[in-house]
Amino acid sequence: MWLIKVHCAVRLANTITFVEHIQEITKIQQLDSERSLSSSLLGIVHNLTTVGFESSGWEVNSREGMLTVVDKLNRDSIEALIHSSQQLIELSVGVLQDVATSSKISKVSIQLKLPDGSLFGKARVLVKDADAFSLGKISLNEYMDCVEWVVESESSG
């Protein structure tokens, strides 16, 4: 129990620090933003775990990188897929920052697996479209038009 309280206190302190110093932080320019995809995946998996998802795998097939997640909060499956798909942008940026994967992966997806092990569906987007949105080159509406939704199961979990 104490670990949960410490974790919450540290996250709150981090958030307060970020909010208080947002102007200074955004003015800092990173000279070299290359980092490994595994480092980005670790952060994405942590973020998803914080909001009730468990990551069960990462694989690359035919230039598409796919992260598979399971919802641990028993949300409606469509809602869970939409919620987890918010990490597509971070996933795309992670692919672009890794020199070993930036030329090998052109699409990223987040796939939702139901508790019974069956696949519900996935959200996928071209890396270049997610990157364009992250850089402010396209609007949210334009980005959302780029996201492809594939529902493989009609059950709502």
Image (cartoon, rainbow, N blue to C red):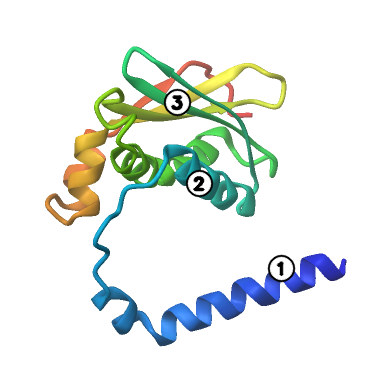
Q: Position of residue 118 (x, y in %)?
A: 63, 16
Which quarter shows the C terminus?
A: top right
Q: Element at badge 3?
A: strand
Q: Nearer the viewer, residue 130 or 79?
A: 130
Check disc 1 and report the residue beneath it: 7
If the image is split into quadrants, where does the N terminus sit?
bottom right
The residue labelled by disc 2 is: 44
Q: Is residue 74 left or right of residue 36?
A: right
Which residue lies at the image location 31% right of the left edge and 83% below the top edge? Answer: 24
Give x and y (percent) for residue 71.
64, 38
The image shows residue 57 at horizontal and vertical percentages of 58, 26
Residue 45 sits in quarter: top right
What mark, if any, has residue 66 been given in the picture?
3
Q: Is residue 122 above or below residue 132?
A: above
Q: Position of residue 97 (x, y in %)?
A: 31, 43
Q: Are marks 3 and 2 in contact (CB under 8 Å)?
A: no
Nearer-N-terminus badge (3/2):
2
Q: Residues within 10 Å of mark 2 (few under 14, many from 20)?
A: many
The type of residue carrying mark 3 is: Met
What distance separates the C-alpha of mark 3 from that of mark 2? 13 Å
Mark nearer the N terminus (1 vs 3): 1
> Amino acid type of disc 1?
His
Image quadrant assignment for residue 73: top right
Q: Residue at x 61, y 71 (%)?
A: 11
Q: Is residue 22 left or right of residue 77?
A: left
How packed mark 3 is, by other alpha carbons closer than 10 Å (few <14, some 14-19, many 20 or more), is: many
- Mark 1 → mark 3, Cα distance in angstroms: 29 Å
Helix or strand or loop: what does disc 1 sit on? helix
